[in-house]
Amino acid sequence: MNYGSDQALRNVSLDIRDGEFVCLLGPSGCGKTTLLNAIAGFITPSTGTVEIDGMVVREPGADRGMVFQEYALFPWFTVEQNVQYGPMLRGAAKTSLIEISDHYLNLVNLKIYKHHYPNQLSGGQRQRVAIARALANQPKTLLMDEPFGALDAMTRESLQEELLRIWEAERRTCIFVTHSIGEAIFLADRIVAIQGRPGRIQAVVENPLLRPRDRTSDAYFAMYRVVDKFLRDAHQLQPDPEPTV
Amino acid sequence: MRPNVAGQRQTDALGTMLLTSGQRYMLAITSLFGSLGLWWLMSAAGWADQVLLPSPVAVLKAFMTSVTDGSLLKNVVASLLRVVEGFLLASIIAIPLGVVMGISRIVYGLVDPLLELLRPIPPIAVIPLAILWFGIDELSKVFIIAYGAFFPILVNTLAGFREVERVQVRAAQTLGANRYHIFRDVALRSAFPFIIVGARLGMSMAFIVLVAAELIASSAGLGFMISDARYNFRTDQIFVGMACIGVLGFALNMLLLQLERSLLKWKAV
C-alpha cells in the first residue's frame, strides 16, 4: 500500500472479527494510520483490498464511524448539532434526533453541555463529543485514530475507561490506532504490532487479560513485556532498507 | 475574557498594563476634544488663515446650515445609496464566483490569471473608462464602487475555501455526508467567516471609491459636496463633508463588525 510516493505498508493481511476490539500498535510512520485510512475508505490501497462483510471498501461510508486525534468537530455547530449530524443526514425526525443526542451525550456525561460550542470545551470533553457523534450514527465499525493522543495522561486514562464502558454496552467492532503499548493492552482483545518502513505486521497478540484490567497488576506488566519485545525484535531485524535523506 | 484574579494586574504579552473600558473611553474623549481644542486655539489665536483653516465654530455653523436646508441629508442619502448599490452588485458577483472558484480547480485556473491582471488596476484608473461606457450618471459610479469592492470580497471568499480542513471533510464523510452535504455543512461553513470579513473590507473599499467617483462628475453626494465647496471657496463646507465621510465610514464598519460578531457566535466564545 502506498501513501504519497512512499510505500507505507507491505503484505498486510488481517481479519477482524465482529464486535472485536483491535488495536493497531506501532511507532510513528509505521503505516498504522494509513491502514486505518484505507479501512475508512479515505485512500485506496495500490494493491490489495479492504473488505467488510464481503464488500470491498471503495469510499468512506456511514457504516464506519471514525474518531480523529484532532477531534474534527464542526466548530459552527453546537455539541448537540454535532452529535445529531449523522442521523440528521439520514433524515431522522426532530424528536428522535433529540432522543439520540440526549442518549449519547448522557453516555459520555456531557448532556449539560449540549448547547455549548466545541470551542467552549476542554480537549477531553471535545473528544467525548466526537465519540458520541460517531456512535450516534450507529456505525457497524468504530475506527479511532490515536483519539487520546493529544490529551494529558490522566484524562487519557479516564477516557480509556469510559470508552471501554461504552464499548461493552454497545459491542461494536472497534479498530483503535495507538503508539502506546499500555493503551493497547488496557483496551484491546487483540493487538496488531506493526513495525518497519514499509510497515509490516510483526505479530498479532491475543490479549488474555480479563476486564476490568488493572494497570498495575503483574499480568499487565508481563503482557507489556511480551508486546514490547515483539516491537523491539522487529526493529532490530528490520532496519530501514534505504535510508532517505 | 478571563476572570480578573484579585490583586493581580492584567497585562498583555509585552507586560504593558491593560486598561479598563472606562479608561479607554476617557482616553478617546481626551484625544478627540484635545485636538478640537487645539484646532480652535489655533484659529482663535489667528495662527491660521481663516479661509484655509476655518475655526471649529465656523464648521459647526456650516454643519447646522446644511442640516437645516436639507442639503446634507440629500447628499448623505445619495452617497449611501451608491455605496449600497455598488456593494451589493460586487457581492452578488464576487461571492458566487469565489464559491465556484473555491470548489473547482478548473474554474479557478481559468479565472485567476484574469483577476491577477485586473487586481493591480486601482478603481480610480477605471473611472475614465466607466464614464465612456456608462456616462456620467449613476451607473458609472455604481460600477466603479462595485469594481473597488469586488476584489476584497472575492479574495477573502477564496481564502475561506483554502481553509477548509481535510479532517472535517473526512469526519463528515464517515457520518454519511455526500458532496453536497460537505459543501453545505463543511466548506461553506468554514469559508463563511472569511466571506464576512471580505464583505466588511469590500464595504470600506466601496466607501473610499465612492468619494473619488463623486468628485469626478455628480450633482449630489458627499464627494460632490466637497468638490462643489472647493469651487465656492467654502472650506468650512469641505470640513463638514470630510467629517461626514469619516463618521459614516466608521459607523458602517462598526455595524458590520457587530453583524460579524452575531453571525459568528461560535468563533468568539
Image (tube, helix red, strand yellow):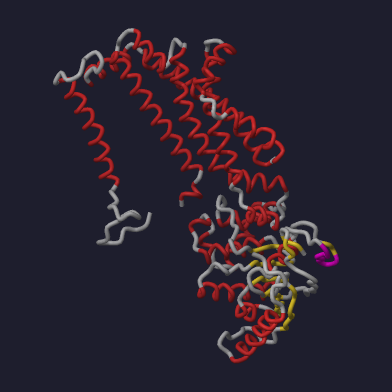
**Looking at the figure, which quarter contains the C terminus of chain A?**
bottom right
| Residue B92 place in picture, x, y as percent | 60, 29
**Is A5 left or right of B32, judged from the image as shown?**
right
| Residue B210 place in picture, x, y as percent | 46, 21
**Looking at the figure, which quarter contains the N terminus of chain A?**
bottom right
The magenta stretch is: A47-54
- Residue furthest to the right: A54
Q: Is residue B71 visible?
A: yes
Rendered image quadrant of residue B109: top right
- Residue furthest to the left: B45
- Dominant SS in magenta: loop
Instruction: Indicate whether B261 appears above or below A9.
Output: above
Instruction: Indicate whether B189 appears above or below A240.
Output: above
Q: Across the whole image, how many numbered discs are drawn on residues?
A: 0
Q: Nearer the viewer, residue A226 or A15?
A: A226
**Is A139 left or right of A57, judged from the image as shown?**
left
**In magenta stretch: residue A53:** yes
Q: Is residue A96 visible?
A: no
